[in-house]
Image (spheres, grey):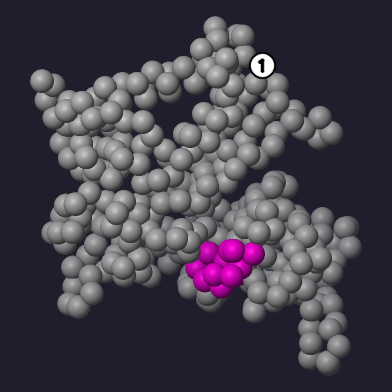
Amino acid sequence: MVAKPLFTPDSLRELIALGEGQFLELKGTWSYAGGAPQALGKDAVRAMVAEYVAAFANADGGTLVIGVEDDGTATGHGRPADEIEHLISVPGRRLRSPLSCDHQILELDDEQVLVIEVGLAPQAVMVDGNGFPYRTGDQVIKESEERINALKQAYRDTGFEQRLANATPDDVDASLLPPAASNPVWMAQRGLVVPRHGTPAVSNAAVLLAGCPPIVRWHPSQSVRVFRVEGVEVQRGERRNVTQVERLELPIAELIPAAYEVLLGQIRRSERRRRPGASRGAASVALRSPSVDQRRMSRLMCVDMSASITPVLLARSAYERRCGHECAAGRSLPGLARTGRRPHVGCAAICGEEPLRDR
């Protein structure tokens, strides 16, 4: 597994406060059967890690937090360093096919906890000698290899966004959608709601696009992380020169323009139009996409600041000249002028309006 800065203590507390569910499992490593807490055995904890990592990988991915009880109390993993090394190697040693997961050890309420971030596996994953676990809700059940692979194929055919969310229309922020969204037919045509008797069902697409906060309750990877690199190439180890600037957790309708503003704020004005090769800084945006492979990070590295940012600025100018729609998507993007021409790409994608002809 790869050590990464996945959470701050505050962001991890926020996630834990949402409670266990499809994407989160909290596991303590202490037994209280005899009154005084006793550390669980090594084999029991390793088997637990193998089971829950495989269960998340066989379903939609998820986050396993070791050292936190079911009620959200941090009690610590209570393991020496060599045992932690064994735990983080479990997905690569005890699973078939082996998995590589990101992990982080951090202090939470004066206790050390281990966080393991599990991605969606393309095929069914087996625990050696213990079959195929599968995550459903806040439970782990056993399924056959054939059944899990069939579910994965169905997932690839339909996609996460088209599945129904555990939400109601009240969980969607209508102010982030165009006025036409007040029409249930318009929403249904775009796959945002599914009409049914009583309250319409809401798709994952609707809550990812315009869900009410906290947005991580709809998907834990609904975020953009902005990094700054000091220099022109990434250094690791003692020479590490990468720092996380900000983590944005917003609905998609607000997420992209907010990330743009944060990224732009990391670039000194004097560097924005320097000649290619003249830059001495770098920046990175990591977009955690909830589609297909929900845990895969699509990363844009702007190694040459001027060469990478100038096209963004030019594109923004083009948007300002072309945008003519008074929609929520257009208003959320910074600095857009209303020239009565046609919508920019982002507006067309979010509000669904057809481009207007140039006058």
Q: Which residues are magenta?
A: 13-25
* Left or right of residue 259, residue 284 in this image: right
Callout 1 secondary element: loop
**Which residue is farthest bottom?**
34
- Give 245 or 186, whichever is nearer the viewer: 245
Q: Residue at x 31, y 21 (%)?
A: 318
Q: Residue at x 84, y 33 (%)?
A: 238
Give the answer, above or below, for where 104 lies relative to 15. Answer: above
Q: Residue at x 46, y 40 (%)?
A: 258
Q: Residue 24 lies in magenta, yes or no?
A: yes
Instruction: Tell me if I can see residue 135 in this picture.
Output: no
Residue 273 in percent (x, y) is at 51, 12
Give the answer, above or below, for where 33 lies relative to 150. Answer: below
Q: Which residue is mark 1?
A: 280
- The quarter of the rendered structure image containing the C terminus is top left
Give the answer, above or below, for where 223 lies relative to 347. Answer: below
- Give 136 or 352, whichever is nearer the viewer: 352
| Residue type for callout 1 | Arg
